[in-house]
Image (cartoon, helix red, strand yellow):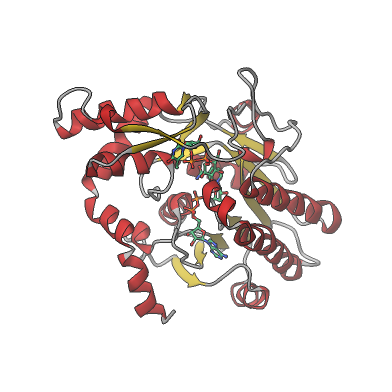
Amino acid sequence: MPHLLITGGAGFIGSHVVRLFVQRYPQYKIVNLDALTYAGNLENLRDVEKAPNYIFERGDITDAAWINDLFARYQFDGVIHLAAESHVDRSITNPLAFVETNVMGTVNLLNAAKIAWEGNMEGKRFYHVSTDEVYGSLGEEGFFTEETAYDPRSPYSASKASSDHFVRAWYHTYHLPVVISNCSNNYGPYHFPEKLIPLIISNIKQGKALPVYGDGKYTRDWLWVKDHAEAIDTIYHKGKEGETYNIGGNNEWKNIDLVENLCDIMDELLGNAPNTSRQLITFVKDRPGHDRRYAIDASKLRNELGWEPSIQAEEGFRLTAQWYLEHEEWLNHVRSGAYLQYYAEQYNS
Ligand code: NAD
Ligand code: DAU
């Protein structure tokens, strides 16, 4: 039975990846390693937590000795590494946490895999999940390709860029069988409401102000999270060793257009009069070093491995708004931090 380690599986994207692999590959033993930081929530995985091929391990990727021990205990054949500090605004106020988890944590995992697989790399795979933010900021034209030079501009993107460099260094120096993907902005169920889309949906529900940074004309390329999970499955199984694949939905939206669209969807779903929620839009101070535009050229992934996004953003934004309205309990727990109190009791920390 192949043993697969997924790190960060209690987070937003990680929980979709864990669910997909646990359900699609009953022949794999899936170990979900997560520190359960504020962003990690086991409620995201209620429907698969009792599956016979699923194991949860609470642990911190910054703890090298514990990580080495985990590799010795499970004899992993593959790793899909998603654990990270992921929010740009938090990286501006607390950059060190990003260096520790995203850089040091990744190096600990690379080292553990190297030690465990030394002398027998055949059939092994270390898949590092990264971001398009490593490429920096685009003007009005153009797309990020796999050849675009790295130009990270926030502590978050600098830490992710650094981790990508370490992954490539372990490939070239130690022949660790790695693959990397760089994805654009995800959205969908279980997205923590500090990020733009769930924050806007949550604030509309509560009748709170909808904060739009700067002039609102910053642009992001949005991808349905389940399409990212499918891309990760494709790349894990079919991607070429040592290669990088860009992942994106080709769905560029200026933030203000996106927020207005969410207002209109929510008004319709809540039975509000037209334009009710747009009144809540409030332009606020800009994010320092705010990247103007991201846009991904995902043609390598489409042409070489055959991946395609299944839905476009208009449909996905509506599905997301519906999901949040149907999962009020999840949202309330996340907003109140009730799940953190449960962890404190359950895990004694
Ligand atoms: P998230 O913040 O929702 O989840 C991160 C998970 O990692 C959480 O469960 C958290 O508990 C865990 N974690 C954090 N520090 C840890 C540590 N030291 N040890 C073990 N676990 C730890 O993040 P996400 O949005 O799901 O992103 C997942 C990955 O995908 C990240 O590597 C991120 O850089 C990348 N990514 C995210 C997006 C996006 O739009 N969200 C896009 C492209 C790439
Ligand atoms: O591009 C991929 C990246 O997308 C991932 O690597 C990151 O982990 C993920 O958090 C995301 O980063 P962004 O900074 O693009 O996402 P965020 O949701 O924080 O912001 C999206 C845009 O909305 C950005 O231009 C900032 C703006 N924004 C954000 C918030 C939270 C606002 O205008 N108001 C807000 O309150």
Left or right of residue 280, residue 150 in this image? right
Above or below, 187 relative to 338: above
Looking at the rendered image, the quarter that the C terminus falls into is bottom left
Q: Which residue is drawn at 64% across and 52% down?
A: 127
Q: Residue at x 65, y 37 (%)?
A: 245
Q: Nearer the viewer, residue 17 or 254?
A: 254
Above or below, 301 relative to 237: above
Above or below, 142 relative to 135: above
Looking at the rendered image, the quarter that the N terminus falls into is bottom right
Place residue 119 in its image quadrant: bottom right
User: Which residue extends farthest front?
Assistant: 285
Q: Which residue is drawn at 41% across and 79% down?
A: 347
Left or right of residue 219, residue 41 in this image? left
Place residue 272 in its image quadrant: top left
Place residue 271 in its image quadrant: top left
Q: Is residue 47 visible?
A: no
Which percent across, then down, holds residue 348? 41, 82
Left or right of residue 243, residue 310 in this image? left
Q: Nearer the viewer, residue 79 or 59?
A: 59
Q: Is residue 114 visible?
A: yes
Which percent across, then down, holds residue 160? 66, 49
Q: Which residue is drawn at 51% across and 37% down?
A: 185
User: Which residue extends farthest right?
Assistant: 173
Exactly how many numbered labels are in the figure? 0
User: Which residue extends farthest top?
Assistant: 141
Which percent across, then down, holds residue 196? 42, 40
